Amino acid sequence: MSENVLEQCVLELFKIGVVKFGSFTLKSGMQSPVYFDLRMIISYPSVMETVADLIWKARPRSDYQLMCGVAYTGLPIATLISAKQNLPMVLRRKEAKGYGTKKMVEGNYKEGQNCLIVEDVIVSGGSLYETVETLIEIGLEVHDAVVFLDREHGGYNNLGALGVNVFPVLTMAELMRILLKHKQVSQDTHNTVLAHIASNRNTSIIKKEKSASRQGVGVMDRKNCSFESRMEITNHPLARRLLQIMTSKRTNLCLAADVTSAHQLLSFANQLGPHICLLKTHVDLLDDFTADVAQQLSDLSEKHNFLLFEDRKYGDIGSTVAQQYSGGAHRVVEWAHLVTAHALPGPGIIKGLTSAVGDRERGCVLVSQMSSEGALTSQEYIKGCNSLAANHTHFVIGFVSQSSVSDDPRFLLLTPGVKLAGAGDGLGQQYVSPRAAVLERSADVVIVGRGITEAEDLVSAAITYKEHAFSAYEERVAASSS
Ligand code: 5BU
């Protein structure tokens, strides 16, 4: 296929609105300045035919006995190819039928037949791999997938690692080059998209039970995985960084520094910095917060390698939280790596917060449960938090919790209400020990405030909490592998 046909096809796709620029949230939760919606081609049969021809020409060999389009957009394309090339198709359902025949795959096939996969776009490769898994399960051979567009977010490598070779007609960078060459986009838009690709090259497929077993890896349950192994599967760079800090500093201790003077906050951060992975603040308690204090906190976070975590518990509509996060006296987005947020407002909370982030690396922790007596967080609410997080893995890094609200290894569970002695504070706070938080409540990170800040010897108290919590984590992981 000549370059010219491909260029003409790209220009045609652009004309009919397949390529859109703006601000989009992809299925994985990733924010993107570009969206490629190939579904549109079913309204333009001749464009669909060209796309199908280009896809067919991208296949590496010719001896396939079957073909399978990935639902939905891969289906009509595969159907066209099937009829034209006289290559039989199978169809993989998106959901199994309720009862009766539980067949996931429709059509005639024989075990051992070699099946070519047809897909419109790959991001992480996750959806495509779900289809591959089912086909392998029923005994088909699947080694190759032809896709129209590789968004260059790691799908090519992820699938390669799982034994599926991907043959894209086009990459996102090539698409942008063609649109720029034909003056359909500005240099700015072109650069924005390339920068987006560059900073999101390595998304991962969350290894579900089946794909894990194909590689001989067990089911990945958060509680059983080391922090180090979880670094590979989180989508969020800050989650990765936090897991890296926890691994290298051997600490899963977060200090809750609830103080009223900047001097005291900075002094805590400097003394205890070597022993913590996170510094949790309530800077709205400070009498004397300034931009300089924020700068000094940032310097200390660099110096001692911990992240800054403002526990602001945002919980309003998107437009209000966007202003609260970026403005006011504290300009939280400018210095706090992480913030807490309630899931109560729904997806708008994430939209609002992310709209203020700009090109900074920022994330949030959803308050799924609270430590206080009589907290109103119901099972329904916890479920809601989980799905909000799962749909926004590029911003949500985990939960504040009191129990194992999620087994998903991409998310971190942070547990407050931790103290070695004392059951409560008389104002509703309820305490458990760091060991119980990690082993019984399944915490990854323990949040300790007064247990340390009111101790006579701050540093030795922090070391004690750190050691209790980290050894409990090591026991938890060791128990699962024995
Ligand atoms: P303490 O001194 O260890 O009780 O401090 C606990 C900190 O964690 C304090 O900053 C609270 O605001 C924060 N916290 C909590 O205690 N319980 C919760 O459920 C949540 C936050 Br969410």
Image (tube, helix red, strand yellow):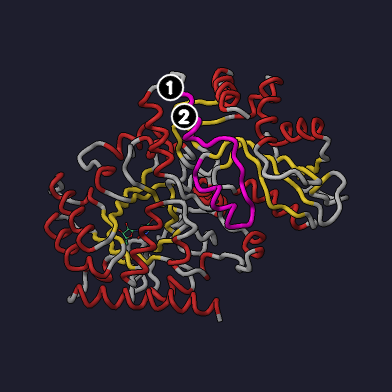
Q: Where does the image place residue 165, in percent across and percent down from the top left?
A: 62, 50
Instruction: Say which quadrant the N terminus sits in.
Output: top right
Q: Residue at x 44, y 45 (%)?
A: 200
The residue positioned farthest toward the front in the image shown: 2
Q: Residue at x 18, y 76 (%)?
A: 457
Return the disc, 2 or 1, that comes first in the chain's sequence. 2
Magenta highlight range: 152-179
In the rendered image, is residue 317 in sight? no
In the rendered image, is residue 142 in sight? yes
| Amino acid, disc 1 | Val
Dot 1: element: loop
Q: Residue at x 56, y 82 (%)?
A: 482
Is 227 placed above or below 10 here?
A: below
The image quadrant where one finds ligand 1 is bottom left
| Amino acid, disc 2 | Met
* Residue 161 horizontal side relative to residue 24, left or right: right
Do the numbered discs 2 and 1 sit on residues whose CB atoms are within 8 Å? yes
Q: Give the Cα separation between the discs numbered 2 and 1.
A: 8 Å
Q: Where does the image place residue 473, in percent across and percent down from the top left?
A: 43, 74
The residue where tag 2 is placed is: 176
299 or 450: which is nearer to us?
Answer: 299
The residue where tag 1 is placed is: 185
